């Protein structure tokens, strides 16, 4: 369970957001530049909010009143970046193992499980430049989960992929969330992606939560809105 | 007559200088990139100064600083009973100072070329700043760092003005190739001077050629 209640002044508006994420996939949906990525960066500890608090289970990540700001390495939050941010000078296996502190039998088992689940058993010794977009996404996912995070942040995880890979990986994301059972917080501006993956959707506009989805929400090809099937935060 | 001592000394001085310059250059570039210290612009200009000031001016300033009556010179004599003026250490100091801007600029450019998201990715995977630096920042900036090292080495090898001011020209002790060339020419021994010219040219050419070869077709000396 993750509780976020933060304010941060950005160049065009002030981000002011408050939500609770249970062990499900929470989607932050909104147009580009509405502050979605800033929220992820604050949760990961890469940015410091101006005020408020971020608490994961019993761990205080950030609290302006208690003057706490844990560095990223102490948060145990994995972050899948939009362009995957795989280390180009390491092969696939070294990338996946990067977040493991001490190699152990359990870590080996987790590694085998991940590469099987994500269907990347044939890739360990490849260099990153030899991977397709879909393969990079899978490797980034494996690397993120290999660090055994208590929260996984995903920034537009499928936007760099072609339609076929996108459909496959949408299903895999849902499956992985069910297996890992930790909060997945996913940022997207694609209504299709939000509806396919999200258990809950939070609509954002200029750094604020809004109750009504933006017009782009209904543009999912068939003109239908699936809004009623979502549990909103209010 | 050509002696090998100035050649060996030049290579020794350049090698030791390059070691200092590597740590100082990388450290300064890292601090300048990752911290917001006051007076950053002034410091940046200060770091570049040895590149634009005449070497003899650098030598003069170092002489004032580490000479027998200089503040650092007095301290060294008082606490360590040591003098660096007119020693090989002075030659190393001169080489380090004049080549520092080359290493600093190369490292800075190399660091700026790194996608910061990669370093952030390492941080979110639990890496300390130290680990991020050694496993992500340094490997990804390596080509730029090697360029800086090679240029610094070549620059130190050819150093004359600052070296003669603080290390002097003591044959067998502080005489490097450029000094040997100057004094051979001055005493009308053009053959010896010419031989030294050939030797230093071959060394410098080999180093730059080796670097370019290593970098393949992407010859980008920062």
Image (cartoon, coloured by chain):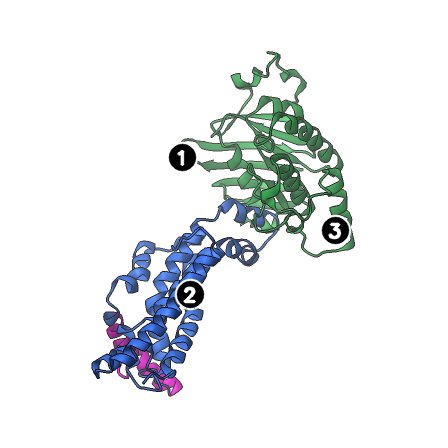
The residue depicted at 61 percent of the width and 38 percent of the height is A153
Of residues B11 and B102, the one nearer the viewer is B11
Circle 3 marks a residue in which chain? Answer: A
Q: Residues within 10 Å of mark 1 (few under 14, many from 20)?
A: few
Circle 2 marks a residue in which chain? Answer: B
In blue, which chain? B
Q: Are marks 3 and 1 on the same chain?
A: yes
* Main secondary structure along the magenta-highlighted residues: helix
According to the picture, the residue beneath numbered tag 1 turns out to be A11
According to the picture, the residue beneath numbered tag 3 turns out to be A107
Which residues are drawn in magenta? B58-81
Tell me if residue A72 comes above or below residue B152 in the rendering: above
Residue A223: where, in percent of width, then height?
Answer: 59, 11
State how far apart marks 2 and 3 are (Cα): 45 Å
Q: Earlier in the sequence, mark 3 or mark 1?
A: 1
Question: Which SS class for mark 1?
Answer: loop
Q: Does A177 sit left or right of B132 as displayed?
A: right
Of residues A96 and A8, the one nearer the viewer is A96
In the displayed image of the protein, which residue is found farthest to the front?
Answer: B191
Of residues A199 and B139, the one nearer the viewer is B139
Residue A9: where, in percent of width, then height?
Answer: 44, 36
According to the picture, the residue beneath numbered tag 2 turns out to be B207
Q: Quadrant of the N terminus of chain B?
A: bottom left
Tell me if residue A30 comes above or below residue B172 in the rendering: above
State how far apart marks 2 and 1 are (Cα): 49 Å
């Amino acid at each position: 369970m993750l509780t976020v209640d933060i304010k941060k002044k950005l160049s065009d508006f002030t981000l002011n957001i408050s939500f609770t994420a249970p062990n499900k996939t929470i989607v932050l949906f909104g147009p580009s530049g509405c502050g979605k990525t800033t929220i992820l960066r604050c949760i990961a500890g890469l940015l410091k909010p101006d005020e408020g608090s971020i608490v994961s289970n019993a761990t205080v990540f950030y609290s302006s009143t208690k003057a706490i700001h844990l560095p990223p390495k102490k948060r145990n939050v994995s972050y899948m970046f939009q362009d995957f941010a795989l280390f180009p000078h390491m092969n696939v296996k070294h990338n996946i193992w990067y977040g493991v502190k001490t190699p152990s039998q359990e870590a080996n088992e987790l590694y085998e499980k991940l590469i099987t689940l994500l269907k990347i058993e044939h890739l360990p010794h490849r260099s990153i430049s030899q991977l397709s977009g879909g393969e990079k996404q899978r490797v980034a996912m494996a690397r993120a989960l290999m660090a055994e995070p208590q929260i996984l942040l995903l920034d537009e995880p499928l936007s760099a992929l072609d339609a076929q890979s996108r459909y496959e990986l949408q299903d895999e994301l849902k499956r992985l969330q069910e297996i890992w059972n930790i909060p997945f917080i996913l940022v997207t501006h694609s209504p299709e992606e939000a509806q396919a993956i999200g258990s809950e959707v939070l609509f954002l506009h200029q750094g604020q939560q809004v109750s009504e989805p933006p017009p782009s929400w209904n543009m999912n090809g068939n003109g239908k809105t699936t809004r009623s099937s979502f549990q909103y935060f209010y | 007559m050509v002696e090998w001592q100035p050649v060996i000394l030049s290579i020794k001085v350049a090698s030791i200088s390059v070691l200092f310059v590597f740590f100082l250059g990388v450290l300064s570039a890292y601090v300048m990139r990752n911290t917001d210290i006051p007076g950053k612009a002034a410091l940046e200009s200060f770091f570049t100064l040895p590149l634009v000031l005449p070497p003899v001016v650098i030598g003069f300033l170092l002489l004032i600083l580490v000479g027998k009556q200089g503040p650092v010179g007095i301290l060294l004599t008082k606490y360590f009973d040591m003098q660096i003026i007119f020693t090989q250490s002075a030659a190393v100091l001169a080489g380090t100072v004049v080549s520092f801007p080359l290493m600093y600029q190369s490292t800075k450019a190399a660091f700026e070329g790194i996608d910061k998201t990669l370093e952030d990715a390492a941080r979110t995977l639990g890496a300390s700043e130290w680990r991020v630096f050694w496993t992500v920042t340094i490997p990804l900036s390596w080509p730029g760092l090697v360029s800086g090292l090679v240029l610094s080495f070549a620059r130190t090898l050819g150093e004359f003005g600052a070296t003669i001011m603080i290390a002097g020209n003591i044959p067998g002790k502080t005489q490097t190739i450029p000094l040997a060339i100057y004094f051979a020419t001055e005493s009308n021994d053009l053959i010896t001077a010419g031989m030294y010219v050939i030797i230093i040219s071959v060394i410098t050419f080999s180093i730059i050629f080796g670097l370019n070869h290593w970098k393949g077709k992407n010859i980008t000396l920062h």
